[in-house]
Amino acid sequence: MRIVTDPMSLRETLSDGLTVGFVPTMGYLHEGHLSLVEAAKRENDRVVMSIFVNPTQFGPNEDLDRYPRDFERDEQLAREAGVDVLFYPDTATMYPLDMARVTVRTGADVLCGASRPGHFDGVLTVVSKLFNLVRPTRAYFGLKDAQQVALIEGYVRDYFVPVEIIRCPIIREDSGLAKSSRNVYLSETERIDASDINRALIEARDALTEGVAITSVQERLVERLSAIPNSTIDYVELVDYPTLSHVTDSSTELLIAVAVQFERARLIDNTIWKRG
Ligand code: PAF
């Protein structure tokens, strides 16, 4: 595995015309990330992973400074997983002038976008830079961040970016808790309690299949999540997927998405329900 920190060396390393599967990350790797590498390995000649904790996607009162980082551990996990090139730039490299950024026009006013203003502008800005640097054939994103996936797909269409976006399934612990770098902030008890989030989402999906009205499904979900001790609900929303707009009678896919705040960790999770 080659570790590359600057754009020139990256370009040189990737100049041989092989197909590239790209896995962008902010590090502190877990099985979710490694499953993206596995998918990328199956479908491409070479796998590039980036590790960059992107400051522009964190709000002023968010956890940028204490976002978990462990490059040595990440490097070893990436190597073992079969990553060919690990791109590990610093902030000055990624934002040489910071003169221009990407702005999201629709789809950022719901779910995480509503609670984290500017977050998705930061995500699309860095993803755009990374795509220009890596020029991947395919890029792999986990559906745990379903809103992120939808907005990246929208960006790629709007800017005619020559990359195929591959949606990958959420990876869960045996308890059902979605894998996340932020799970390290949970206490043992919170970790057990948090596994209720997945159960509540499954119940909501089943209720939609049984024909329960969307407002009732949402109410039940709120009730269910409110019962999780020592946590508060940030949002519980059902939106059309991947447009992220209001659900209508013609919506064929619904995203049921939640965010729950524990003492030191804000967890997001979701499930996609497909009509009949
Ligand atoms: O999903 C993430 O880890 C980040 O949002 C991404 C896509 C690497 C951009 O910083």
Image (spheres, rainbow, N blue to C red):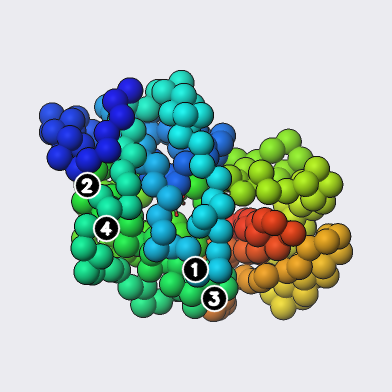
Mark 4 CB lies closer than 8 A to ligand 1: no
Give the residue at x 43% y 45%.
Answer: 25
Residue linked to disc 2? 133
Label 1 near label 4: C-beta < 8 Å? no
In the rendered image, which quarter is residue 112 located in? bottom right
Mark closest to the chain's N terminus, 1 or 3: 1
Mark seen at residue 96: none
Mark 1 CB lies closer than 8 A to ligand 1: no
SS label for mark 4: loop
Above/below status of 45 relative to 54: above
Number of numbered discs overlaid on the protein picture: 4
Residue linked to disc 4? 95
Left/right of residue 107 with respect to residue 17 in the rendered view: right
Query: Mark 1 belongs to which amino acid?
Result: Gly
Disc 2 from disc 3: Cα separation: 30 Å
Label 3 near label 1: C-beta < 8 Å? no
Query: Mark 2 belongs to which amino acid?
Result: Leu
Residue linked to disc 1? 59
Disc 4 from disc 1: Cα separation: 17 Å
Pointer 4: residues within 10 angstroms few (<14), some, or many (20+)?
some
